[in-house]
Structures are given as structure tokens and as C-alpha cells.
Image (spheres, helix red, strand yellow):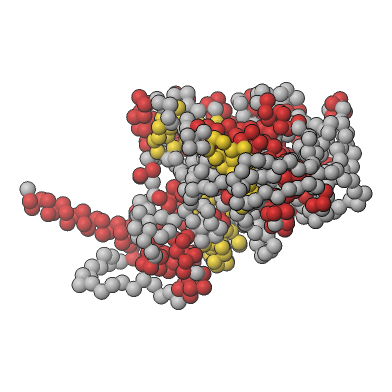
Amino acid sequence: MATSAGAVNTGILKDSKFRIQKFNGLRPCDTISLSRFVHVLPVSSSSNSSVITAVSAPVKTDTSAEPKRSKVEIFKEQSNFIRYPLNEELVSEAPNINEAATQLIKFHGSYMQTNRDERGTKSYQFMLRTKNPCGKVPNKLYLAMDELADEFGIGTLRLTTRQTFQLHGVMKKNLKTVMSTIIRSMGSTLGACGDLNRNVLAPAAPFTRKDYVFAQETADNIAALLTPQSGFYYDMWVDGEKFMTAEPPEVTKARNDNSHNTNFPDSPEPIYGTQFLPRKFKVAVTVPADNSVDILTNDIGVVVVSDADGEPQGFNLYVGGGMGRTHRIETTFPRLAEPLGYVPKEDILYAVKAIVVTQRENGRRDERRYSRMKYLISSWGIEKFRSVVEGYYGKKFEPFRELPEWEFESYLGWHDQGNGALFCGLHVDSGRVGGKMKKTLREVVEKYNLDVRLTPNQNIILCDIRRAWRRPITTALAQAGLLHPRYVDPLNITAMACPAMPLCPLAITEAERGIPDILKRVRSVFDKYSESVVIRITGCPNGCARPYMAELGLVGDGPNSYQIWLGGTPNQSSLARTFMNKVKIHDLEKALEPLFYCWKRKRQQKESFGDFTNRVGFEKLQHIVETWNGIVEAPSRYNLKLFTDKETFEAMDDLARLQNKNAHQLAMEVVRNYVAAQQNGKGE
């Protein structure tokens, strides 16, 4: 266990130039010895016994050898708990901030960006990301974010894949005003970015069922447990004034408990210390079968386990999921979480803390590319990882409980909450709220005083709606293009894209701006409205829209170029694999048309596209693509030539694209309607 940086006098903390003493405690991941954990008694994997065998706490060790560390680790060490030099950079006249401050402001929930569409002088701006456990957004916060987007942003709000808002285009001079407004409006951006726990996901549906309520309460508690405690966030943005609500006593107790050497004694950050975590850390909580949260993509996945009466008893834990990777470096990869074990409900905070501390102490800090917990588990294996976690937990994990198959839930449309009220899930293409949609949503939220929830699929839920309000709300939303899901193309409902160009500095190509046209092109290849696959697109390999879980994932690997990933499943329980590299945007049909054509004609009953690609195999699919000569039309006694000139075809094609159709489909529809009208006329 690392040694503490020591108690820090609160008066000294206010000095922006004060430096914390050099940190020497963290060990590289290959130096830990399991011999430190004595008296670890085995528990049969086939047993469902609730008897827990105590184990000893890890023994703290000191090391004089200083391991190699990345530049970001040095920035964190010298920052006086994420304050310096950010505090000085924010009050300078420059529109940007320096390298160290750029890393530190992430912990406060912000990234510095530039508009890459502009040439010449860089126009610096900042993106802010909120922290909304379970996607919960109080009425006051929603209205505040709506106003901030217009006054200080680019006029739109972005719903993220982790149930939060992103606000783009904030100037440095306005950061404190925007941040303080969010804080005073019951919101926060603390920990939305940076090397610490990110937003904790949970099913967004506001059901009053016991397991859903318990999952959301647990997500709130985990978020509170892993929230930084040293006050740097409030010092920076509201001059030290605290706006945190009182947390449950069990959270405080779990955080302060050091019976198994998990904490830094007398430190302002008892769990994180001066260095926080090696990289970002993601947690999701859900109930059995509900995979609205992409549970297997998280560092920790927490699943409520209930008894026969629906009463929550404990939790299954998954560990080691993560999406990020780097092109052409095979030692980086997306990974699915795997089962760790089961804990009774009263132990969940202690178990989560033990996992976090294991990663804190052993995750790599020399090379950030390999710093996520998935690489630690991949290197160690799950058995060694479990044993080390148990040392910090103080108990053996019980055997993993059996779970039903996962299902993807969107929660779009109207639903009963279970308490007499309704909720309405609304599809938002790529999570971008703007224009008439934004104006109407504000009017509805404000008029009916509604709370809001954001979903992990970039959609929005309006909560606690009285039944008498359903009709007027439906009418208002429909007029703004927020339609019932039956009127939305199924391709759009499951599709996701990251923001990518022009603001993300990591983007290689388009994602959000490119996905509307790509979906229309896929729809025209299908030539059948009811067909659908899960499509996710990212502008770089970091995987923010989780493309490696999609049936068809497009990952930017060059200008106007994508990798094609295949093999994910509709319920997000399988990992996709690379199928093709460097496919230019204008050549997508050359790969997709033969794949979809073959799927429609050779799939088994109700077989999804992802399952089909896995069954047939990539080698055979590659051969199909390489030898494709186009669709062979079946012979017909009808030979209807719809278009006599190119101009007519192009005009019809433009009109058809507005309806997610191709020119042939629209022309045939017009002809059929005309014939039907003539026949009806004869019969009158």
C-alpha cells in the first residue's frame, strides 16, 4: 500500500504555489506479491454457501526505487490536489491554458478544444461535461443547461453515451460563470473527466419497482463514495463554498474505513491520494436482463440480485471491461468485463472500494495507453486479480449468481412508472439537442415542471407525467419532430456516434456529422424498412460510442476512411472484431451491400446480422465481398423502365432520400398509388 503524502494544513492548501511532497508509494503492476495476503482460504466454486471467510489485510510496503511515471503523473503530484497551475492559468489573459492545466481541468469536467474546421489562428474553447449518476437531471438543472447552451455555448446540448450533458463552445473567460451556474443549479461536472471514477450508469427508466430503485440508489452511493473529497472543485469555481448534499451514513463509513489498508491516512483524498487513479474508471449498475447500460464495457459492472419475492439481496460483480484502443498497436484492445463474484448488499461499497484500490495500487502509471484496469486483469488473469481484491475487501467473494440473457432496452415511447405517473422516452439522433427540438423540450419541461433522465443511448426521458398531460405533450413533441418510436427508422433508434469533428482533438474523421447520410445509405441497401442492425460510429479508435459492441461498427482510421468491425450482437453481449481496414466513405456500399444481401438470404430464422457474421465466419464473408458483382435480379415477365433520363432519376433520388428511401422505391410507390387511385375511380 502506498504511503500517504501526509496531512496537509488547510491554510497551506489555499496557497496556489504550495507543492505536495514527492510521491513515491505506487508500485508498478508486476511487483506485487500474493504472499503478502496470508490465510486466504479457498471457497468451492460450486458452493452457494453464504459463509464468508475472513482474510488478512495487505501489508503496507515501502520502496525506495522510484518507478517510471508518465508526464501526467508528475502534473498530478505537483498540483496541490488538482489546483496548481490551473488556478493561475484561468485568470491569465490568454484564451488557452498550458499543458499541465489542460490535464488538470479534466478532473473538473472540462476539455480544451479548437475548431478544426477553421484554418489559421486557433480559436480555443472548452467543452464541459456534467456528472449525472443514473442520468438524473432535476428540472432546475435542465433549464439552466438549456440557457447556458444559448448564452455561452454553440446553441445546442449534447447527450452523451454515459448519461450526461456536454456543453460545447465555452470561452475561457466564461468558464467560472458557467461552472458556478451548474453547481448552483443542483448540478456538477466534478469527475466527469480525468483519472478518477466517471459518471456511474444505471437504467434511466424511472420505474418504482424495487430492483430498479435499488440499482439507482446503489449507483448514487457508488458515485458519492468515489467523489473527490479535497475540495479543489469548489475552491476553483465557487470560491470554496460547498454545495454537496448530505450523503448517506453508510457511504461516509465505507469511505473512512481503513481496516484493510485501503486509505491514505490523514490525506485530503483518503481513497485517491495525490495521484488519483492511473486512468479513467467507469462503473455501471443494472438489474438482471436490462442491458441498457452496456454493462460489459465498464471497469466494474454491478448487477442487482433479488430473491423470489423481488427483494434485493446482493450483487454480482463484473470487472475489466473497456473500449479504448490504438490503431496498429495490437497490445491495445477492447475488452469485455468478466465475472468476479457475488457480495451481499451491505458489502457493495466495500467491494467496489477494494477493486478501485487494487487498480490504484497496481495499474500502470508509466504508459497511459496501458493504464486502464482491463490491461491489469488481462496481464494477471482473473484469479490473481480476485485474490488481491479480496485482500482489500477482507473477505472471499461468493460464487457468481446465475443471470438471465441480456436484452437491450431503449425505453422509448410512453410507459407506466408504477406509481400512477407516466414517463416518455424520446429518440434524439446522435444525442444532439438543438433548434426547434431544443425549444420545444424546454417549453414542455418548464410548463409541466418535469424532471429529466438521460439514457446511455443518447436519448432523453421525461419523468412523472400525469395521464391528463399525455395528449398535449405528445402533440407538442410531434410538432418538433420528436416522434413515437414506431415512426422512427429502427436503424436510427439503435445507432450511436461520437461528436468527432470538428471539435474533438482526437478525431481522425467524421462521426456525428456523417452518420445521417451513412444510415440513409444503409437503409437504401436494405430496401426493406423493417430490417435493422446496431450501427455505431466513432471518429477515432477510443470508442466513445462503443463501436466494438455493435453489429456494424465504423471506426475512423484516416481522412474519410473507416475500419469495419463486425460481430457484436443486438443485446450488447459480444465483442465485435475487425473485418476490413481503410474503407473510404464513398466505398462503403462495396462492403455492406454483399454482406447485407447474403444475410437476408442465408440467415437462419430471426438470426441477427451480428450472429450471422459470427456463424458464417470472416474468411467466407471476405470472399463474398471480394467476388461481389452486384445483385442478380430474378427473371420477371415484367420489364418496367421507371426513368428515361438522368435528370429525372436524380430529382427523384433527392426526394427519396428525405424519406429514407431510394429512387426506385419512391417511384414504384408513386406508380402503385396512381394505379390504385385509377381503380378506385372506376369502381365508384
**For this view, does 225 lie left or right of residue 265?**
left
| Quarter of the view holding residue 593 | bottom left
Along the line of sight, which residue is nearer the eye, 37 or 515?
37
- Looking at the image, residue 627 sits to the left or right of residue 232; the answer is left
Residue 565 lies, in percent from the top left, at: 54, 62
**Front residue of this view, candidates 573 and 82:** 573
- Is residue 106 at all visible to an observer of this figure? no
Return the residue found at the far right: 64
Residue at image coords 65%, 26%: 248
Q: Position of residue 544 (x, y in %)?
A: 60, 50
Question: Toward the viewer: 312 or 91?
Answer: 312
Q: Residue at x 40, y 68 (%)?
A: 598
Q: Nearer the viewer, residue 526 or 382?
A: 382
What residue is shown at x 38% (from left), y 64% (from top)?
A: 604
Image coordinates of residue 605 in percent, x first then y, are: 36, 61
Picture layout, residue 632 above or below residue 271: below
Residue shown at 52%/62% (left/top)? Answer: 566
Q: Is residue 390 left or right of residue 156?
A: right
Q: Residue furthest bottom?
A: 627
Is residue 343 shown above or below 566? above
Residue 77 visible: yes
- Tell me which corner region of the image, top left, top right, bottom left or bottom right, holds residue 653: bottom left
Q: Position of residue 558 (x, y in %)?
A: 61, 62
Q: How many marks?
A: 0
Quarter of the image where the N terminus is located: top right
